[in-house]
């Protein structure tokens, strides 16, 4: 890996956040983004006022907490679409949960360059992916201005912020996140609002914003006419830190998208979701047979060789 990666690791560890610019090649991002439009309306369609495109965005979020039909269960978010710096329900429309009905997007969710960066930053190869979703925003949906906050909703106990205990939250940019389309505003470690000067976490597609739970940050409004912004949430924790979590993957483990994705995975990739690696006492010959039966096409060679 380049020196820039090591610099980004040091920035995350010491200032609490970093943008790893061009972590994934633009060509890979662009190929995967072609699959986005099965989950989101294309920005040109949305901004044309197409009723179908508007309905697609309003009603197709796979996180039911943010669907309009569930407004009565909005977890304390303001349901009024007013202007101002606050958390409101419509800011959180456009969440699509992993796994996706899209091969390249699924593979992007476990991209080795992002995983490698997270392992280096956290100082461990034994980590878990615990938040995985795509979040799309369009200019005019709502006022996206938020107050500065820390993400305390990822753990049920107070954060222990030191090597060996910290978790890594992050957004992989699927579109260019420039001024006018809502780049996150963020403060350095130790700074707190009000009064501290925020920085813009802007970056082009393929960049990765990584931050810690002890830094203050906020979402800002999209102001560019016809603008949009798409991110992939990729957050990691150390293995066996059960008190940290956000998304549950087991509930989708019998669905077709997960089965196809799992069949394409290496043991290391499945381990990001908690699957025992080859050599773990969980595995027997019969269970490896069952793994092949469950995920047709998976390369079970590493599990069989470990049994030998």
Image (cartoon, rainbow, N blue to C red):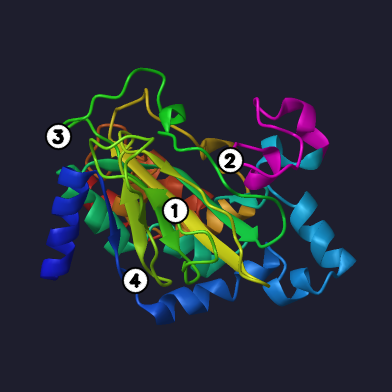
Residue 191, given in percent of the width and then of the height, sits at 27, 37
The residue that disc 2 covers is 85
- CB-based contact (under 8 Å), mark 3 and mark 2: no
Q: Is residue 214 left or right of residue 71?
A: left
Label 4 to label 2: alpha-carbon separation: 33 Å
Write the start and end of the magenta stretch as one range.
Answer: 69-92
Q: Residue at x 78, y 27 (%)?
A: 72
- Residue of label 3: 163
Residue 119 picture location, percent across and down: 21, 49
Work out which quarter of the rendered image holds the N terminus and state it.
Answer: bottom left
Q: SS of the residue at dot 3?
A: loop
74 magenta-colored:
yes
Between marks 4 and 3, how big is the CA–CA gap? 26 Å
Looking at the image, which is closer to me, 41 or 104?
A: 41
Magenta highlight on residue 263: no
| Mark 1 or 3: the one toward you | 1
Viewer-nearest of labels 3 and 2? 2
SS for dot 4: loop
Whether the residues at callouts 4 and 2 have beta carbons within 8 Å, the answer is no
Disc 4: which residue: 24
Q: Which mark is residue 184?
A: 1
Tag 1, which secondary structure? loop
């Amino acid at each position: 890996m380049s020196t820039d990666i090591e610099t980004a690791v040091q920035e995350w560890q010491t200032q609490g956040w970093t943008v790893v610019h061009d972590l994934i090649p633009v060509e890979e991002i662009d190929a995967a983004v072609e699959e986005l439009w099965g989950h989101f309306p294309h920005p040109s369609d949305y901004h044309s006022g197409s009723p179908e495109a508007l309905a697609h965005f309003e009603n197709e979020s796979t996180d039911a907490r943010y669907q309009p039909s569930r407004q009565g269960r909005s977890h304390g978010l303001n349901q009024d679409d007013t202007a101002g710096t606050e958390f409101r329900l419509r800011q959180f429309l456009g969440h699509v949960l992993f796994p996706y009905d899209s091969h390249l997007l699924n593979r992007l969710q476990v991209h080795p360059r992002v995983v490698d960066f997270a392992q280096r930053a956290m100082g461990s190869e034994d980590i878990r992916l615990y938040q995985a979703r795509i979040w799309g925003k369009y200019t005019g949906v709502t006022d996206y201005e938020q107050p500065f906050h820390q993400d305390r909703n990822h753990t049920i106990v107070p954060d222990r912020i030191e090597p060996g205990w910290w978790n890594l939250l992050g957004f992989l940019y699927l579109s260019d996140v420039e001024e006018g389309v809502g780049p996150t505003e963020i403060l350095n470690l130790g700074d707190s609002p009000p009064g501290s000067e925020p920085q813009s976490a802007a970056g082009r597609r393929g960049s990765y914003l990584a931050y810690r739970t002890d830094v203050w940050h906020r979402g800002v409004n999209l102001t560019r006419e016809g603008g949009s912004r798409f991110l992939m949430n990729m957050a990691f924790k150390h293995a066996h830190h059960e008190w940290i979590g956000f998304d549950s993957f087991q509930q989708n483990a019998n669905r077709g998208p997960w089965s196809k994705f799992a069949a394409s995975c290496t043991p290391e990739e499945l381990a990001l979701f908690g699957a025992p690696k080859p050599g773990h006492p969980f595995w027997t010959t019969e269970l490896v047979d069952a793994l092949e039966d469950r995920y047709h096409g998976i390369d079970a060679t590493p599990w069989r060789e470990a049994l030998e």
